[in-house]
Image: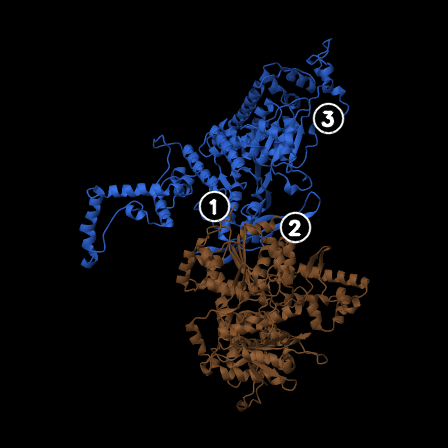
C-alpha cells in the first residue's frame, strides 16, 4: 500500500507558501526536497538555510495534516537548533503551523525525545515520581554518596585517577550500557588499584551499588536515558511500533552530530526501510566532528555516506561570496561543489562591511616559535583594518579565534593548543563550561557573552538561580533540589513567575548598569521571593557584590595591543572583542571574521591539509586523522561569512604552497 | 483496549477501593446509596463524556472530611491504540510463557483533586489535575487524548423527549452530524434547503412580504438615511443561499449543515402526542448507540448507562440487555451499566455482575468469589426476577420450604423485626443443593482472614436436620400411637437411632460454609413444622390443623403434627392465628386501661405497645432456637430492654 502521505505537498503549495512567507525557493533542489514525501538523506552545506527549509516543509505539512492522534516528529541535536525551528513556526503567519508545537506532534532534541517517549515512562513505571537527568547533578550526588562508609574503598581507589576532576570525569561516564552480557555500569578508566581481577570485581560491585542508590534517588546521566529507552523497547516489544505509528513522518536536523548510539536507537524505532514511515534526515557529514572518546562516536548510517549516495545535496550557500566559498570548498571531504547563492543586492549590502567597500582579503598568518604569541594580535589588526568602523561597533559584530585542541597544556610535551596562542586561555573557562563564583559574575558573563541569543543568557542565569537555591538549602516539595521545571511550576503556582522573569530580563538587558545600588535591590528582590533571610553563609556569599575584574589596569589605549578579558575574551582597542574557543564550541555559529589557529593532535592539522587548501591536492581523504582534520577545519572555516584567516607555523608551509595560495587569492602575512 | 481497573480514594462513599472490570459488560447492582452512581460518576469525572455535560469535582465529592481525592482508571490491552499516548504509557512487568520478565503497555489516567481552602466566584476552589503514570506521576493528559477516551453516557430517567428535540447544539444534531449517511449527503441536504429558501422568499411569498414590512416600516424608520442603502433585512433557513453553495469551503458547509440539523427533532412515528416515556427512552438509547458504534474506530468505545430500565416493562428490559450484549460482543464496546432491575440482573451472566455495598465493590467474576465454572451456568438459569433479589438485599434468608417462606416474615414481624424494615429478602431454594451456590456467590475467595474484604450482606441459610425420632415409626403392633413412617432400606440414614453422632450430622449439613458473613442454621429437629410443634406452638398447630390436642411427650406431639402437615395452608393459617393472638392481647391490654384514661390516645398507644412487646417476648420463648437466631442475625437481636419499632402491625390488627 502506498504511503498515504505521498503527494501531500504540491508545487502550487510551495509557491504559495514562498509568496506568503517571503521565502526564496528558486532552485529545483530545494523545491524538490520540499515536495518529496519519501525517506531521504540530505547533505546541506554551511549557510544553505537548512533550518528554513525544514521549517518551510513543516508549515506545508501542517496545512495538510488531518491525522488527529498521529503527528510529525522533528528531532535535532541541540536545543539551539530546536529553538530555531520553533521560532520559525511561531513567526509564520500560518495558524496551522502553531499546531505542530503541541500534541500529537513533537519538536525537540533526540535526548528529549528519548526521555519523553521511552526512558521516563519506564522510570515512572518503576514507581519513581521525578527523575533528574543532568550530568552535573548526578556527579554531585555520586560524590556525596561516595562519602558513605560502605564506599570508602571505592572512593580511595578512585583517588588513584589523579585529581577530583578526573574522578568527576570518571563518574560522568558511569552510565549503564547494554552488552551481550547484560546491563552493566560503564567503566571508562581503571585506576591502578583495580588491575587485579579480584579488585576489579569488587570495584564493579561497589559501582553497581552506587549506581543503584543513584537510581533510587532518580538521578541519571543523559546517556542512561538511551540505555533505559533501549531496555523499554526490548522488554515491551510493541513499543517501538507504537512510536512509528504515532510519527509517520520524522525529520532529523543536524544529523551529522547524531551519535552512533542515538542513531541506533532511532533506526530501531523508525527503520529507514519502513515504507510506512517517512524519515527525512538533514545534515552535513563534512561537518561531523566527534571527540571519538568514550561514547562520543559518529553515526555511520549518515556520516558514512558519500555525496553520491545522498538523495539530495544542497551546495549553494547564503553565507559566503564566491571567493570565500572557493576557499572553503577544498576542505569538504565529500567534495561538495560549494557555491554562493548571494544576490547582487546582497553583495552590495555586504560590501558595506568592508572598510573601503572592497572585498575581503583572506589571510594566512605565518608565525615562528618566537612570535607565536602575537598571531592573535596580527589577526586583530587585520580585522581592525578590513572591517568598517561602524560595522565593528555594532553589537552583533562577532569575531572568534578558534582551534581544534583547547585543553590544558602540559609543558613537557610537544603540543600546540589554543593556550599557546594566548596564555590566558583556559579550557575550564570556555563558554560551555562557564562556572561563576557569584551571581553577579554570571550576570556579567551573560551581558558580555558574545552570543546575541537572549535565551542562552537566560539559561545561564536560571541555572545560577538554581545554584543559589541549592546553596540556600531550598528544596522542592519532594525534598530534592529544584530543577528549572519544578522551580517554574512553583513560581507559576504562586503567581510569581512573571515577576521573576522580569527580574531576569532586566538583569540581562543592560538597561541598568550593574552598580552596587541596583545589585542591592536585585538581592532584596530575590531574598524576598525565595525567602532567603537567614540563609547559610554560602548563599549570602553567592549574592555578594563585586567590582568587575577587567584586567585592564595597564591598558595603554595607544599602543593598539589587544588585552585579555575574563571568559576567554580579548579586546581590541577599537572596542570589538575576539572570543577564543574550540572548534567544537562554535558548531552551528556564524561569525563576521574567524581565525583558525593551527593545533596539534599527533599531527599539525592545518599543515596536513595545506596542499588541499592551496589547491595542490584534491583527493578525498581516507585516512582517519585526515578525515577528522578536514572536517574540523571545514567546520572552522565555514563559520566566517566575511573574513577567514588561518594561523600556521612557518615550518609547516612550503614556498610552492605559498605561491599556489597567493595565486588563489590568499594573502600571506608574517607576524 | 478496555478499562481493566478502577482505583478510587476518598471519593464520596468510597474510601479506598480497587475494582477490576470485565472487558465487555459490567452490571452494577446494589441497594440505594451503595455506590453505583458514584462509580459511574467517578469514571465520568476522569474520562469526560461526549455529550455536553461538563462535570466538575464539588466539595460534596470528597469522602467525609478528606481534603484530597483521587480516581485512577487503568486501561489494558492498549497496543492497538498505544501510539496515541506513548508518552503516557506505563510498562507493567509480567512473566511470559518462558518465565522471562517482559513488560506490557498499560495506560493509567488519574484524576487528583484537592480543596485549596480558597474561593472562586463564591464557590470553594477545588484544584484538579489529570495525569498518567502508575501513581499519577506522569504527564498531564492532553485534551485530545481525553476526547479519545471519553465515554458515551446515558443518564438515568432522562427526559428522552427533550433530548431528542431540536435546539442549539442538540444531542440529536450531534448524533446526526456524526452519522455516515449525513456526512456523505451533506451537499444534497444543503441544496434542498437552499431551494426551499428560495421558494419561501420568492417575490410574492408571504414571508418575503413580512420581511419587507419589517424593513420598510420599522427598521428604516429607526436608522439614519445614509445607512438605509446598506442595511436591509432578510430571512433564510440556516443561512444557505443557492448561489453561494458551490463556492463554500467544507467547514462553512458543515456549519450550515449543523444549523439545519439543530432544527430537527426525532419522534416516534405513531404520532399521538403522549407516547410512553419508555419508548422514547429506547429511541434515545438507539440513537446514542448508533453514534457510539460509528465512532468506535477513532474513539475508545465506552458506554456508561444508568438504570436503563426506567419506564420499560420487564420484557423490554430484557430485550434491551440482550441488545446491549450483542453490541458489546460485536463492536468491542465496553459497557458499565447500573441497574435496580431484578429483570436485568436475573437475565445477566452472574460473572458480569458487580455488587456494590457500603462503598465497596464485590465483582462476581470467576476467581473473586468461591463460585466455580458450572455454578455460573446454574445460577444464570436458576435466577429469576424474584430470586434476583439477592443482588439488592441487605440481608438474605435462604429457606428450604414454603412453610418457612410464608411464615418467617410473619414471625419476624411479630417479634418486632419486620424483614422489610431491615432490607431482608427471603428466598426459597430447591433441593438440588443450590443453597451452596448462593452461599458461594457471597463468599469472597481466599478472604476468610480479611473481614474487611467480606461481602457485608448477611446471609442466613436455614436447613432441616431431617432426623426422625423413634416415635415416628409406624410399628406393626401399633405401639407408636403417632408413628407414620415405615423404615425401609432407602430411609435408614434418617432415623435418629441410626445417627451415631448428631453433631457430625449438623457439621455435614453446614458443609463448611459457615464462614465470612454466612450463617448456616440447622433445625434443632426434623423439620421447621416439627420444631414449631415441639418447642411451644403445639396448641396453635392443633388449632391450625383443626385437630384435638393430645397428651404426650413433646416429640410425640411434634410427630403428631408433622404427620398432618402437608399443604402451604398450614403456614398461612398459622400466621393468621398468631396475628389473632396478638390482636387479642392488644385488646385485653386496652380493656385493662383505667376508665378515666380509656379515651386518651397516648394511653392506648402505650397499652398497644406494651402488649406487642409482651407478645413478642412470649413468642420468642415458644419458638425453636434456630429460628430466633436466624431472625436475629439478619435483623438485630431481640432483647427485653430494647424498644420495638414504632411502626408495628399491631396497630392495624
Residue B505 marker: 3
Mark 3 or mark 1: which comes first in sequence?
Answer: 1
Give the Cα separation between the discs numbered 2 and 1: 34 Å
- The image quadrant of residue B30 is top right
Please identify which colour was used for chain B in the image: blue
| Chain assignment, label 3 | B
Nearest-to-viewer mark from 3 and 2: 2
Compared to residue A171, the image places residue A595 above or below, namely below
Q: Secondary structure at mark 1?
A: loop
For the residue pair A234 and A283, the one nearer the viewer reads as A283
Residue in the image at 21% along x and 49% along y: B214
Residue A235 marker: 2
- The image quadrant of residue B489 is top right
The residue labelled by disc 1 is B49
For the residue pair A214 and A49, the one nearer the viewer reads as A49
Q: Could you confirm whether marks 3 and 2 are on the same chain? A: no
Observer able to see residue B45 = yes
Please identify which colour was used for chain A in the image: brown
Looking at the rendered structure, the number of numbered marks drawn on it comes to 3
| Chain assignment, label 1 | B
Amino acid at each position: 500500500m502506498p504511503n498515504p502521505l505521498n503527494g501531500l505537498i504540491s508545487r502550487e503549495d510551495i509557491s504559495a507558501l514562498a509568496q506568503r512567507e517571503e521565502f526564496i525557493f528558486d532552485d529545483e533542489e530545494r523545491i524538490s526536497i520540499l515536495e518529496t514525501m519519501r525517506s531521504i538523506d540530505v547533505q546541506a552545506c554551511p549557510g544553505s538555510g537548512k533550518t528554513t527549509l525544514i521549517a518551510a516543509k513543516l508549515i506545508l505539512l501542517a496545512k495538510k495534516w488531518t491525522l488527529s492522534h498521529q503527528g510529525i516528529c522533528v528531532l535535532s541535536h541541540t536545543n539551539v537548533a530546536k529553538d530555531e525551528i520553533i521560532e520559525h513556526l511561531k513567526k509564520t503567519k500560518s495558524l496551522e503551523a502553531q499546531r505542530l508545537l503541541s500534541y500529537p506532534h513533537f519538536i525537540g532534541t533526540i535526548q528529549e525525545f528519548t526521555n519523553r517517549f521511552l526512558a521516563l515512562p519506564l522510570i515512572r513505571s518503576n514507581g519513581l515520581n521525578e527523575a533528574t537527568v543532568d550530568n552535573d547533578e548526578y556527579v554531585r550526588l555520586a560524590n556525596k554518596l561516595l562519602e558513605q562508609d560502605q564506599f570508602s574503598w571505592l572512593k580511595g581507589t578512585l583517588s588513584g585517577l589523579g585529581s577530583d576532576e578526573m574522578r568527576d570525569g570518571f563518574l560522568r561516564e558511569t552510565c549503564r550500557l547494554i552488552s551481550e552480557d547484560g546491563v552493566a555500569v560503564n567503566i571508562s578508566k581503571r585506576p591502578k588499584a583495580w588491575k587485579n581481577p579480584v579488585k576489579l570485581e569488587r570495584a564493579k560491585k561497589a559501582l553497581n551499588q552506587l549506581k543503584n542508590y543513584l537510581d533510587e534517588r532518580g538521578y541519571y546521566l543523559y546517556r542512561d536515558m538511551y540505555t533505559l529507552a533501549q531496555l523499554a523497547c526490548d522488554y515491551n516489544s510493541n513499543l517501538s511500533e507504537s512510536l512509528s505509528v504515532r510519527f509517520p513522518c520524522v525529520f532529523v536536523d543536524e544529523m551529522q552530530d547524531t551519535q552512533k548510539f542515538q542513531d541506533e536507537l532511532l533506526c530501531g524505532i523508525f527503520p529507514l526501510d519502513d515504507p510506512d514511515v517517512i524519515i527525512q534526515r538533514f545534515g552535513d557529514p563534512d561537518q561531523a566532528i566527534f571527540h571519538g572518546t568514550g561514547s562520543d562516536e559518529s553515526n555511520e548510517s549518515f556520516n558514512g555516506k558519500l555525496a553520491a549516495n545522498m538523495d539530495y545535496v544542497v551546495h549553494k550557500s547564503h553565507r559566503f561570496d564566491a571567493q570565500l566559498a572557493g576557499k572553503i570548498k577544498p576542505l569538504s571531504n565529500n567534495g561538495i561543489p560549494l557555491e554562493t547563492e548571494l544576490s547582487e543586492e546582497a553583495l552590495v549590502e555586504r560590501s558595506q562591511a568592508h572598510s573601503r567597500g572592497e572585498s575581503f582579503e583572506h589571510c594566512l598568518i605565518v608565525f615562528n616559535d618566537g612570535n607565536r604569541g602575537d598571531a592573535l594580535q596580527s589577526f586583530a589588526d587585520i580585522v581592525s583594518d578590513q572591517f568598517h568602523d561602524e560595522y565593528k561597533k555594532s553589537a552583533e559584530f562577532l569575531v572568534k579565534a578558534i582551534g581544534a585542541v583547547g585543553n590544558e597544556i602540559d609543558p613537557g610535551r610537544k603540543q600546540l593548543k589554543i593556550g599557546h596562542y594566548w596564555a590566558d586561555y583556559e579550557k575550564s573557562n570556555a563558554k560551555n563550561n562557564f562556572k561563576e563564583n557569584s551571581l553577579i559574575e554570571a550576570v556579567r558573563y551573560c551581558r558580555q557573552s558574545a552570543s546575541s541569543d537572549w535565551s542562552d543568557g537566560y539559561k545561564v542565569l536560571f541555572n545560577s538561580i538554581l545554584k543559589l537555591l541549592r546553596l540556600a538549602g531550598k528544596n522542592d516539595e519532594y525534598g530534592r533540589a529544584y530543577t528549572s521545571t519544578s522551580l517554574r511550576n512553583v513560581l507559576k503556582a504562586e503567581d510569581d513567575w512573571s515577576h521573576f522573569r522580569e527580574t531576569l530580563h532586566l538583569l540581562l538587558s543592560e538597561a541598568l548598569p550593574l552598580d552596587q545600588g541596583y545589585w542591592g535591590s536585585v538581592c532584596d528582590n530575590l531574598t524576598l521571593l525565595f525567602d532567603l533571610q537567614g540563609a547559610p553563609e554560602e548563599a549570602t556569599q553567592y549574592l555578594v557584590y563585586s567590582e568587575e575584574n577587567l584586567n585592564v589596569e595597564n591598558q595603554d589605549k595607544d599602543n593598539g595591543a589587544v588585552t585579555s578579558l575574563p571568559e576567554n575574551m580579548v579586546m581590541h582597542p577599537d572596542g570589538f572583542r575576539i572570543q577564543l574557543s574550540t572548534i567544537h564550541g562554535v558548531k552551528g555559529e556564524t561569525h563576521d571574521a574567524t581565525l583558525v589557529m593551527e593545533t596539534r593532535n599527533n599531527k599539525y592539522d592545518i599543515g596536513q591539509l595545506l596542499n588541499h587548501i592551496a589547491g595542490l591536492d584534491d583527493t578525498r581523504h581516507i585516512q582517519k586523522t585526515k578525515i577528522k582534520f578536514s572536517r574540523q577545519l571545514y567546520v572552522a572555516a565555514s563559520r566566517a561569512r566575511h573574513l577567514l584567516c588561518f594561523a600556521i607555523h612557518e615550518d609547516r608551509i612550503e614556498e610552492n604552497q605559498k605561491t599556489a595560495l597567493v595565486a588563489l587569492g590568499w594573502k600571506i602575512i608574517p607576524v | 483496549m478496555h478499562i481493566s481497573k478502577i482505583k478510587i480514594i476518598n471519593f464520596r462513599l468510597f474510601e479506598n477501593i480497587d475494582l477490576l472490570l470485565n472487558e465487555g459488560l459490567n452490571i452494577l447492582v446494589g441497594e440505594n446509596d451503595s455506590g453505583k452512581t458514584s462509580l459511574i460518576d467517578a469514571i465520568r469525572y476522569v474520562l469526560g463524556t461526549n455529550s455536553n455535560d461538563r462535570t466538575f469535582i464539588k466539595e460534596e465529592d470528597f469522602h467525609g472530611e478528606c481534603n484530597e481525592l483521587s480516581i485512577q482508571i487503568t486501561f489494558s490491552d492498549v497496543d492497538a491504540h498505544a501510539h496515541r499516548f506513548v508518552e503516557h504509557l506505563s510498562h507493567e512487568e509480567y512473566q511470559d510463557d518462558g518465565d522471562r520478565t517482559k513488560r506490557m503497555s498499560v495506560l493509567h489516567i488519574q484524576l487528583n483533586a484537592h480543596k485549596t481552602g480558597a474561593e472562586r466566584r463564591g464557590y470553594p476552589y477545588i484544584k484538579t489535575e489529570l495525569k498518567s503514570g502508575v501513581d499519577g506521576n506522569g504527564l498531564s493528559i492532553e485534551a485530545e487524548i481525553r476526547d479519545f477516551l471519553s465515554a458515551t453516557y446515558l443518564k438515568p430517567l432522562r427526559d428522552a423527549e427533550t433530548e431528542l428535540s431540536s435546539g442549539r447544539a442538540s444531542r440529536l444534531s450531534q448524533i446526526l452530524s456524526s452519522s455516515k449517511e449525513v456526512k456523505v449527503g451533506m451537499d444534497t441536504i444543503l441544496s434542498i434547503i437552499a431551494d426551499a429558501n428560495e421558494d419561501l422568499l420568492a417575490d410574492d411569498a408571504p414571508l418575503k412580504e413580512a420581511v419587507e414590512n419589517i424593513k420598510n416600516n420599522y427598521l428604516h424608520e429607526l436608522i439614519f438615511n445614509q445607512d438605509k442603502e446598506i442595511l436591509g433585512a432578510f430571512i433564510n433557513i440556516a443561512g444557505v443561499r443557492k448561489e453561494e453553495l458551490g463556492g463554500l469551503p467544507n467547514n462553512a458547509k458543515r456549519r450550515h449543515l449543523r444549523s439545519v440539523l439543530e432544527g430537527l427533532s426525532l419522534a416516534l412515528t405513531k404520532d399521538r402526542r403522549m407516547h410512553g416515556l419508555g419508548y422514547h427512552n429506547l429511541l434515545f438509547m438507539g440513537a446514542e448507540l448508533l453514534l457510539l458504534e460509528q465512532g468506535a474506530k477513532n474513539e475508545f468505545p465506552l458506554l456508561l448507562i444508568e438504570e436503563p430500565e426506567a419506564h420499560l416493562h420487564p420484557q423490554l428490559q430484557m430485550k434491551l440487555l440482550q441488545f446491549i450484549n450483542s453490541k458489546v460482543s460485536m463492536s468491542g464496546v465496553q459497557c458499565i451499566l447500573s441497574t435496580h432491575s431484578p429483570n436485568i440482573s436475573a437475565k445477566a451472566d452472574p460473572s458480569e455482575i458487580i455488587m456494590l455495598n457500603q462503598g465497596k465493590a464485590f465483582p462476581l467474576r470467576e476467581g473473586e468469589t468461591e463460585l466455580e465454572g458450572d455454578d455460573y451456568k446454574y445460577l444464570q438459569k436458576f435466577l429469576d426476577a424474584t430470586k434476583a433479589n439477592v443482588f439488592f438485599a441487605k440481608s438474605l434468608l435462604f429457606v428450604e420450604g414454603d412453610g418457612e417462606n410464608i411464615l418467617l416474615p410473619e414471625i419476624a414481624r411479630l417479634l418486632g423485626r419486620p424483614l422489610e424494615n431491615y432490607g431482608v429478602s427471603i428466598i426459597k431454594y430447591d433441593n438440588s443443593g443450590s443453597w451452596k451456590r448462593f452461599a458461594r456467590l457471597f463468599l469472597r475467595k481466599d478472604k476468610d482472614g480479611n473481614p474487611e474484604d467480606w461481602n457485608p450482606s448477611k446471609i442466613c441459610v436455614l436447613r432441616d436436620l431431617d432426623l426422625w425420632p423413634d416415635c415416628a415409626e409406624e410399628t406393626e403392633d401399633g405401639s407408636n400411637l403417632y408413628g407414620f413412617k415405615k423404615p425401609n432400606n432407602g430411609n435408614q440414614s434418617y432415623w435418629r437411632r441410626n445417627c451415631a453422632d448428631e453433631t457430625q450430622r449438623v457439621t455435614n449439613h453446614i458443609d463448611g460454609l459457615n464462614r465470612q458473613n454466612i450463617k448456616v442454621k440447622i433445625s434443632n429437629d426434623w423439620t421447621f413444622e416439627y420444631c414449631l410443634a415441639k418447642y411451644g406452638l403445639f396448641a396453635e398447630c392443633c388449632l391450625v390443623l383443626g385437630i384435638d390436642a393430645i397428651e404426650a411427650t413433646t416429640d410425640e406431639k411434634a410427630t403428631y403434627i408433622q404427620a398432618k402437615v402437608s399443604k402451604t395452608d398450614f403456614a398461612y393459617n398459622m400466621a393468621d392465628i398468631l396475628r389473632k393472638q396478638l390482636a387479642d392481647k392488644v385488646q385485653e391490654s386496652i380493656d385493662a386501661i383505667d376508665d378515666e384514661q380509656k379515651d386518651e390516645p397516648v394511653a392506648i398507644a402505650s397499652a398497644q405497645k406494651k402488649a406487642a412487646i409482651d407478645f413478642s417476648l412470649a413468642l420468642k420463648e415458644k419458638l425453636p432456637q434456630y429460628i430466633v437466631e436466624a431472625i436475629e442475625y439478619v435483623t438485630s437481636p431481640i432483647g427485653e430492654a430494647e424498644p420495638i419499632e414504632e411502626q408495628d402491625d399491631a396497630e392495624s390488627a
